[in-house]
Image (tube, rainbow, N blue to C red):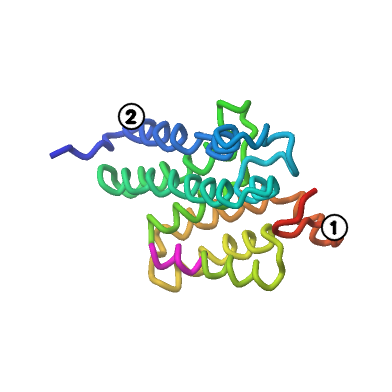
Amino acid sequence: MIPEITTGAGGLILWAAIGYLIGSIPFGVLTAKYMNLGNLRDIGSGNIGATNVLRTGNKKAAALTLLLDAGKGAVVVILALAFANEDAIQLAALCAFLGHCFPVWLGFKGGKGVATHLGIMWALIWQVGALCCLTWLIVAAISRYSSLAALMAAGMAPGFMIFLGYDTVAGLGVVLAVLIYWRHRANIKRLRSGSETKIGQKT
């Protein structure tokens, strides 16, 4: 049986590193390269997430990127749930998100963290993950704006946590929501001006 790996500051640093390194794997870039879709940085918005991969016209690549980006967030949380205490779990989850947004392999210029956020939510509290995904799907279906759907899902996540009685992790939900809003500040400006790109629309 593997002992809990959470002893003191060293344990927290270890889980922060594990979270960051796993989270920083740029699956969008790797998927685009593997499927010969070109340099994702030169396509659409230049973002490394599934929405921008979809702008290549390859739905399979976009779906794979979505699953892998969500999966890395989920894997970090699952590992931490098995071997860490609550503080380390939340720190690992946060660092996985930061790893996606600021990956060392890409000069700290990464994605906006939406899929990774959903993966974290699913692994941490599956009901919250399900509600966030449902929120995203409803808003995306009505508005056709991926960014608006992401903002709504992330913004409602802390409320879902509190409503379901998971107050101790609601703070993490707030931090992740704030980071997602900050990462989407350009999208928010475009939404306000009516110039935001819709799902599936090439730029």
| The N terminus - image quarter | top left
Q: Callout 1 environment at 10 Å: few (<14), some (14 to 19), or many (20+)? A: few
Judged from the image, the secondary structure of the residue bearing numbered disc 1 is loop
- Please report the bounds of the magenta region as a residue range: 126-132
Circle 2 residue: 10
Observer-side mark, 1 or 2, equals 1
Q: How many marks?
A: 2
Q: Are marks 1 and 2 in contact (CB under 8 Å)?
A: no
Q: Nearer the viewer, residue 97 or 29?
A: 29
Q: Could you tell me the amino acid type at mark 1?
A: Ser
Residue name at image x 46 percent, y 60 percent: 170
- Image quadrant where residue 46 sits: top right
Q: Reply yes or no: does residue 107 show up in magenta.
A: no
**Residue 53 shown left or right of residue 95 in the figure:** right
Left/right of residue 113 with respect to residue 120 in the rendered view: right
User: What amino acid is found at the position of numbered circle 2 in the picture?
Assistant: Gly
Sequence order check, earlier mark of 1 and 2 = 2
- Which residue appears at 66% of the width and 53% of the height? 181
Residue 140 in percent (x, y) is at 65, 66
Q: Residue 199: percent from the left, percent from the top? A: 70, 59
Name the residue: 59% across, 32% down.
33
Residue 127 in magenta? yes
Coordinates of residue 3 in the picture (x, y in percent): 18, 38
- In the displayed structure, 35 sits above or below 121; it is above
Depth check, front residue: 47 or 183: 47
What percent of the width, then of the height, locates residue 16?
A: 42, 35
Residue shown at 52%/64% (left/top)?
133
For this rendering, which residue is in front, 190 or 7? 190
Q: Which residue is mark 1?
A: 195
Per the model, the C-alpha gap separating discs 1 and 2 is 47 Å
Secondary structure type for disc 2: helix
